[in-house]
Amino acid sequence: MRPIESWCVSWCLSREAGVQKKDFLEMVVNQVEDWVYSTDDNYLDDVDFHDAVVKSIHQTDSEIIVEIESVNILPQHPLNPFKVAKNTGECRLIFTNPLASAAAIFAPDGTPEPMICTDFKQLEILQFDCVEQETGKLYKIFGVDDQFCEWKVQAEGFTLHWNEFLTNAWFVAPI
C-alpha cells in the first residue's frame, strides 16, 4: 500500500472512531517525515530566513507548522559543518504552544488589514525577529505576500527541521 493510500485508510478509520480532522492532520504531519537536522530558537541568529518562501501553514491547538521551501544555515551554526552558509532545501518550522497569532497584509496606503496566517498565498520572509517576553517569545515576521505583510506569533519557542545542506547560500561569493 502506498503512503497516500495508507493515510486515506487511516482517515476513514479515524473518522469512524470520532477523531477530528485537525487532530488527524496533526498526527499525519508529525509522522510523515523524520528529519535529519533540528535546531531551535536559541540559534535564530545563526539561521537566515531572508527570502525564505512559505509553502503552507497549519495551525493546531499546540503548534503552528510552517512548511518552507528553504532557509540558509550560517557557518557559525553548530550543525553546519561547512565554512560557508548553506541552503537547506525543504524545511519545517514548528512554533510550540502558541498563545497568539496575528497577521496583517498592508494595503497600498499602508493600512494593515487583519488576516488569518493560514490564508497567506506565498509568503516570502524578509525579516524574522524574536523578542523575549514574560509569557514566552514574540516572533515578528515581516514579508511579502503580493503586498507587504506582517505576522506575529507569541509562542513558547520553535524548532526548525531539515534534511540536508544542498548548495551554498545565494549570498556566498563564488570561489
Image (spheres, rainbow, N blue to C red):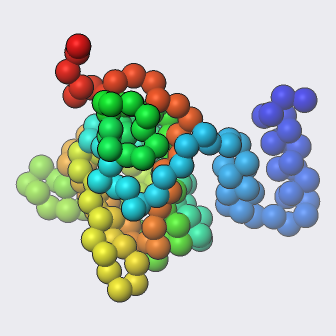
- Position in image of residue 19 (x %, y %): 81, 64
On screen, residue 58 above or below 88: below
Left or right, residue 147 beside residue 154: left
Outermost residue on the left side: it is: 109
Outermost residue on the bottom side: it is: 134
The image quadrant where one finds the C terminus is: top left
- Position in image of residue 124 (x %, y %): 31, 41
- Position in image of residue 64 (x %, y %): 51, 60
Foreground: 35 or 29?
35
The image quadrant where one finds the N terminus is: top right
Foreground: 108 or 100?
100
> What is the quadrant of residue 62 in the picture?
bottom right
Residue lying at 23% horizontally and 50% vertically, measured from the top left? 127
- Position in image of residue 53 (x %, y %): 37, 38
Residue lying at 68% horizontally and 52% vertically, measured from the top left? 30
On screen, residue 146 above or below 83: below
> What is the quadrant of residue 26 in the picture?
bottom right
Residue lying at 52% horizontally and 67% vertically, measured from the top left? 96
Outermost residue on the top side: it is: 175
Left or right, residue 127 beside residue 157: left
Determine if residue 122 is in view: no
